């Protein structure tokens, strides 16, 4: 009777030790996987800054400006209010003015961050230094 009880107790202790050891090993494995530093993310703003010097070379006559109209501006595909909007500009957003329309009522602009271009109503921007 005593040997059966001893075997049972030894079996329970060994089971607890094996279960604890396995749990510790699995936890150690996953903690080491989680502790490794992930790769550094590259945000769109950083990509834009890296490519900005190449993309935003100013053409002759072009200059930097910012939007002064509080409600922002509509970016259109051609110099007319009847043309479909292709985007919008926010108040105080920096842009590059490329050219003026022949009647000087519209300005062709390019976004400072990216290659998007369009026409805005003249008189709603202010020239700024780079």
Image (spheres, grey):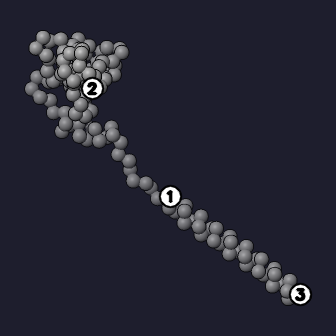
Q: Give the mark nearest the N terminus, 2 or 3.
A: 3
Q: Position of residue 39 (x, y in %)?
A: 39, 53
Residue 65 shows in this picture? no
The residue wearing badge 3 is 2
Secondary structure of the residue carrying numbered label 3: helix
Q: Is residue 55 above or below residue 111?
A: below
Q: In front here: 81 or 55?
A: 81
Q: Using the numbered discs, state the Cα–Cα distance from disc 2 to disc 3 in whole angstroms.
A: 88 Å
Q: Disc 2, disc 3: CB below 8 Å?
A: no
Quadrant showing the C terminus: top left
Residue drawn at x 72%, y 76% is 15
> Residue 35 shows which numbered tag?
1
- Residue 76's quadrant in the figure? top left
Q: In front here: 117 or 76?
A: 76
Secondary structure of the residue carrying numbered label 2: strand
Q: Using the numbered discs, state the Cα–Cα distance from disc 3 to disc 1 in whole angstroms.
A: 49 Å
Secondary structure of the residue carrying numbered label 1: helix
Numbered circles on residues, count: 3
The residue carrying pointer 3 sits among few (fewer than 14), some (14 to 19) or many (20 or more) residues within 10 Å by Cα, namely few
- Residue 55's quadrant in the figure? top left
Q: Give the mark nearest the N terminus, 3 or 1.
A: 3
Q: Give the mark nearest the N terminus, 1 or 2.
A: 1
Residue drawn at x 85%, y 86% is 4
Q: Position of residue 97 (x, y in %)?
A: 18, 22
């Amino acid at each position: 009777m005593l040997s059966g009880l001893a075997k049972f107790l030894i079996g329970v202790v060994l089971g607890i030790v094996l279960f604890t050891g396995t749990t510790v090993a699995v936890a150690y494995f996953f903690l080491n996987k989680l502790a490794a530093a992930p790769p550094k993310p590259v945000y769109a703003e950083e990509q834009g800054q890296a490519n900005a010097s190449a993309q935003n070379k100013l053409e002759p006559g072009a200059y930097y400006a910012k939007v002064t109209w509080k409600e922002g501006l509509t970016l259109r595909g051609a110099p007319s209010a009847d043309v479909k909007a292709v985007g919008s500009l926010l108040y105080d957003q920096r842009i590059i003015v490329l050219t003026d329309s022949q009647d000087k009522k519209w300005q062709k602009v390019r976004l400072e961050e990216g290659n998007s271009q369009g026409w805005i109503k003249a008189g709603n921007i202010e020239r700024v230094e780079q």
